[in-house]
Image (cartoon, grey):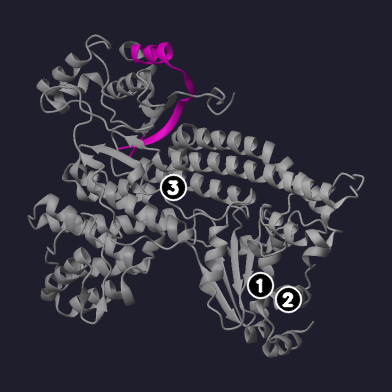
Amino acid sequence: MTPDQFITKWRNAELTERAAAQSHFIDLCRLLGEPTPSDADPKGEWYAFERGATKTTGGEGWADVWKRDHFGWEYKGKRKDLTAAFAQLQQYALALENPPLLVVSDMNQFRIQTNWTNTVSQSHEFKLEDLRDAKVREQLKWVFTDPERLRPGKTRQTLTEEAAAEFAALAQRLRTRGLEPTAVAHFVNRLVFCMFAEDAELLPNKMFLRMLQAAQAEPTQFRRHASTLFAAMKDGLAVGFEQIEWFNGGLFDDGESLDLHEDEIEICLRAANLDWSEIDPSIFGTLFVRGLDPDKRSETGSEYTDRDKIMMIIEPVITRPLLGEWDLIKSGIRSYLDPAERNVDIAVENASSFPELQEEIRAVRSHLAKRPQLELFEELPKQRRVRTLDAVRASLRSADKVLVDARQRAEGELRQFQAKLRSFRVLDPACGSGNFLYIALVELKNVERRVAVEAELLGFPPSFPSIGPEALFGIELNPYAAELARVSVWIGEIQWMRRNGFDVGRKPILKPLQNIRRANAIIDEEGQHAVWPAADVIVGNPPYLGAKLMKRRLGVAETEAIRALYTDRLPGFTDLVCYWFERARELIEKGAVKRAGLVATNSIRKNTNLPVMQRIAATTRIYEAWNEEQWTVDGAAVDVSLICFGESDNLETRLNGGL
C-alpha cells in the first residue's frame, strides 16, 4: 500500500472506532512493510490485537494492539480526545509489561509517547497527511522494529542535577543578602513546587512563567505578584480571571514572599524552562538540600545515592514481602474460583440446547469472570449430555451457587488484602530530604496497582489507587531537609498518578504531611527515648558518625545522655548509627514492627559495634544483607553495609544478592 492510497482511504473513512481499529492497523503494517500481529504471532503471545480481552465474552482489552518490548497502541474514533486513550494505556502499562512506547491514534493523527523509566518522556506527533514524508514513516517504523531509536537522550538524573544546581545557586545568593536561612528554604521550596505544578498542569496557562517574565522587566514587582499567587494557592482563589487550585498542605500556609533581584529572576527563568514534571525526587532533595543548608555549602558536587541503591533496601523490606503475600492469596483464590467457573461453563454448555433455560443462562453468565484469555476454557471436558430439563436446570443452579459463593469468598480475601495495603505504614527515622520515603511510596503504589490489575484478571471490577503520602512517617533533625522531604513526597505522589493515567486528588492537592516531622530520633528533650510513630516497617540511612566524633559533633551532654539510655545493651563506645539499629531491633522483638532495612558503614560488623549485630541475630533474623556497597554520604562515596532483618516468612536468605 502506498502512502497516497493509505491517506486517501483513511481520510474519507467514517467507521466507528471498534470497526476501524484493526483494519487501520493492518493497512498501516502494509504501508510500512511490516507483518501483521496474526502473521507474526498466530498465538498472540507477544504481538496481538486486544491484549487483555476476554475470550469467552469478547469486549475490549487493555490495548487495541500490543507488541512485547515495543508498544501498547490504543485507538479512538475520529476527532475524539486522545487523552482518554493515553490514560488507559498508562493505567494498564503494568499489565502490558511496561512497553517503552505508548501510541494513541484517531486514524487522522498519531501520538507516540516514550515510556522508559529513567528518561525524560518525549512526545512525537504527526497527522495522516504527514505519512507522505519518508522521515515520518521511518520514525513510525521504528515503533514496530527498533524502539531504542526513539529513546530520549536526556535522563531524569541529568535534568534533576540541572534543576537542583540552579536552585542551590539561588538559595546561596539569597543567604548572602543576610536573609534568614529557614525563610529562604521555605520560599525556595515554594518556587520549586510552583515550577513542578506548572509543568504538571496544576497551575493554569504557564502562570508562574508569565509572572517571572513580567518581573524580569520590573523586578520590584516580583514580591507583590508572588505573594498574590501564594495566597491564592493557600485557599484556592482566583488571580485575575484565572482560578487557582487549592494547594496548601502547609507549604502554602500564607502569602509571604521574598524579593528577587534581576539576576535572581534570571536564575528562576532558566530553571522554569526545564521540564519539572520529570524531576526525580529520589535524588533532587539530596542535591538541593546542599544549597539550602548553610552547613552544607561545601557539598555542592553532583554525587548522590541513586534509586537502584535505595531499592536494595526497599525491595526486600516492602516490595518482595507484600507481593509474596499477594501471590499466596491469589493462588488460593484461583484454586477454588477456577473450578467453580469451569463447572458453570460446563453447565451452561449442557443447558444451551434448552430454549426454556436461556434466561437462566444469561443470569448465570453474568456471574462469570470477565477475565482475559487464560486458556481456562480452551478445552472443556467432554461429558455425556444430561437429557432432562429439570436435571439440567438443577445442575445449572447448583454450579451457579457454588460460583457465587466462591466469588464472595474471593472478594472478601481480595478486599482484606487491599485494606491491609491501605493501612501499611513505613517509617524512616532519619529521613533526610525524603529519598527513601519517596521510593517507598512509589513501591507501595506499584504494589497496589499490580494487585488491582491482577484482580481484574480474576474478574473483579477496576479499582482506583488509594494509597498516598499518609502511608509514610519521617523523622529528621535538619529543618531544611525535613521540609524538602515533604515537597519530594508531594511531587512523587502527583508524578505517579499522572504517569499511571489517573487524575490528581484535589481539596487540597497537597495533603498535610505532619507525619514527616522535625525531631531528634534517638533522644527527646527530657533525655528519654524519642517516640517513634507506629509503623509496619522501618527503612532508612541513619547518620554515620564514629564514636570518637560524637562528643565533638553532638556535644558532650547529648552524647553521654544517649549512651546512658543504652548502657545495658550496647558498649559505651559505639558509633551513632548503632542506636538506630538497636531501636529497630527492639521494636521488632516487641512485635510493634515487622521488618527493618537500614544502611550503616561497614564498621558496624567490627569491634564495639558488633554487639548490635549479635543482638539482632539472637532475637530476629537477618534475611538480606550486602557487606560492601558504595554509598554516597555528604557528597562523597563510602563503603557501607545494607542489612534487612525481622519477620521474613517465605523469604529466602540472601547475601550480596545470592542465596
Q: Quadrant of residue 151?
A: bottom right
Is residue 536 visible to us here?
A: yes
The disc at residue 140 is 1
Label 2 to label 3, Cα distance in Å? 37 Å
Q: Between residues 169 and 51, which one lies in front from this camera angle?
A: 51
Judge whether 281 appears above or below 27 on screen: above
Instruction: Please name which of the two marks, 2 or 3, marks the residue nearer to the observer.
Output: 3
- Magenta span covers which residues? 611-637
Could you say whether the residue bearing mark 2 is in a helix, strand or loop?
A: helix
At x 66%, y 62%, the residue is 61
> For the residue labelled by badge 1, is the local secondary structure a helix, a strand or a loop?
helix
Q: Is residue 262 magenta?
A: no
Q: Which residue is mark 3?
A: 442
Residue type of the residue flagged with mark 2 = Leu
Q: Identify residue for label 2.
A: 28
- Report if residue 621 lies within the magenta region: yes
